Image (spheres, rainbow, N blue to C red):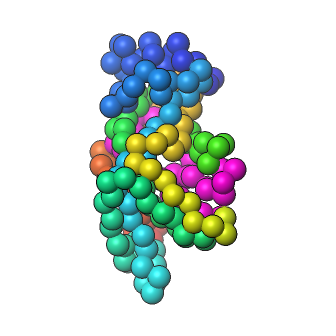
Amino acid sequence: MILSDRSIRSLMEKGELTIHPLDKEQVQCSSVDLRLGNEFARYEPSSVIDVRKSSGKLTRVEVEEYIEIKPKEFLLATTVEYIKLPSNITAFVEGRSSLGRLGLFIENAGWVDAGFEGQITLELYNANSSPIRLYVGMRICQLVFARLDGEPYKVYSGKYRGQRGVTPSKINMDVDL
């Protein structure tokens, strides 16, 4: 079941769901808007990404006002907000339609497991043939919350728990590699 603004606010008031910092205007009828942070990372074009060894060579950038994403460019970004989900709530990260209509794909693998806490690392891709300028602090995506049908045996305690800022892939830590 998707949570309403009433349920989201109730969970936050009880301290069961944390989203910080948060302005009340960010809570929509069935989601919470998250804002773009000031930390970004670009993969160096000449680096080979070997999933068994590392996540590739990244150039990190901190900006004060805005960043431009070139056409067909992939960029990692972070949200301003730090979230903490209870063990019975999961969340979907959805891009804003207004930005999608400009050709900006916003993703984070789309899913936030129950029990996760940290800032959300976003994967941004400019599918347009023109650069797109994004501003620090603008609403970039939204979280849609859903209640699990029961308590899970195991809540999220993975390699991204507690992440702050742009966090590159840690796929090289997967046991199957």
Left or right: where 120 falls relative to 140: left
Q: Residue at x 35, y 13 (%)?
A: 14
Q: Quadrant where the N terminus lies?
A: top right
Q: Quadrant where the C terminus lies?
A: bottom left
Q: Relative to the observer, which residue lies in front, 119 or 98?
A: 98
**Residue 74 in sight:** yes
User: Residue 84: which quarter of the image?
Assistant: top left
65 shown above or below 2: below
Magenta residues?
Answer: 100-127
Left or right: where 80 falls relative to 97: left
Q: Residue at x 39, y 65 (%)?
A: 41
Q: Does the magenta stretch include residue 106?
A: yes
58 shown above or below 160: below
**Residue 159 in sight:** no
Left or right: where 20 falls relative to 71: left
Q: Relative to the observer, which residue lies in front, 162 or 102?
A: 102
The location of residue 114, given as percent across then percent down, is 45, 35
Q: How many labels does the image show?
A: 0
Which residue is most to the bottom?
46
Q: Is residue 123 magenta?
A: yes
Q: Residue at x 30, y 45 (%)?
A: 162
Q: Residue at x 47, y 23 (%)?
A: 25
The location of residue 5, given as percent across then percent down, is 54, 18
The location of residue 94, given as percent across then percent down, is 59, 42
The location of residue 141, given as percent across then percent down, is 53, 42
Q: Relative to the observer, which residue lies in front, 117 or 43?
A: 43
User: Residue 31: which quarter of the image?
Assistant: top right
Which residue is most to the right?
101
